[in-house]
Image: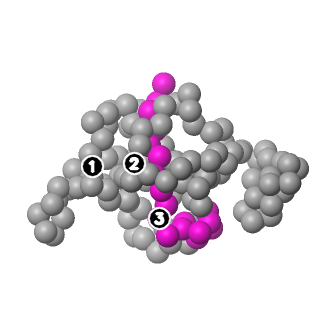
Amino acid sequence: MALHLVKLAVGAESVEGLAAWQKTRSTLAHVTRMMPARREELLAGGSLYWVIKGEIRVRQKLLDIEAITDKDGTKRCRLLLDRTLVAVAPRPRRPFQGWRYLQASDVPPDLGGRGGSDLPEALRAELASLGLL
C-alpha cells in the first residue's frame, strides 16, 4: 500500500489557480523544509494531495524526493511532481504547517469522471454544497 503526503496549497484559490501557477514553472517541484523519513514508501506510488480552501481537492503523483541546499545553506527537500492534476472527492482538512503523511486508507477517491469532475470547479462545489453531487 502506497503512502502519500498532504500539503496546503498556500495562495491557491482554486484547482484552476494551482494549475495556472504550475504551468509557469519549467520544472514542476515543490520545495519544503523537512525531508520525509519514509521516502521509499512515498515513491512506491504515492501522491501529493493538495488542500485548497480547507478541502483536499486534487493530487499529483510524486516522481522523486531530493535533498537540496538552498542559496543560504539551509537544507531543504524538493518534491518532484507529475504535471497531471487528478481531481479527488473533496474532503475537509483543517489548516496545518508543512506536510503530513496520508495513509492509503485515508485518501479521498479520484473523481475519474464521476461526481461532476468534468464541471467547472465553482459549479461542482456549488452543486455539492446543495447535496446534488
Residue 103 location in percent, x, y? 49, 31
> How far apart in space, not on screen, are marks 3 and 1 (Cα)?
17 Å
Q: Where residue 105 is drawn, which disc sits there?
A: none
Q: Where residue 34 is drawn, which disc sits there?
A: 1
Check contact, mark 3 vs mark 1: CB within 8 A: no
Q: Secondary structure at mark 3?
A: loop
Earlier sequence position, callout 3 versus callout 1: 3
The kind of residue on which mark 2 rests is Trp
**How many numbered marks, from 0 up?**
3
Earlier sequence position, callout 2 versus callout 1: 1
Residue 114 location in percent, x, y? 79, 45
The kind of residue on which mark 3 rests is Val
Q: Is residue 70 left or right of residue 59?
A: left
Which residue was labeled with disc 3? Answer: 10
Start-end of magenta stretch: 1-18
> How far apart in space, not on screen, are marks 2 and 1 (Cα)?
8 Å
Residue occupying the point 80% across, 61% down? 126
Residue 127 location in percent, x, y? 84, 56
Check contact, mark 2 vs mark 1: CB within 8 A: yes
Please name whichever residue, 103 or 22, is drawn nearer the observer in this view of the structure. Answer: 103
Residue occupying the point 56% across, 48% down? 93
Which residue was labeled with disc 2? Answer: 99
The kind of residue on which mark 1 rests is Met
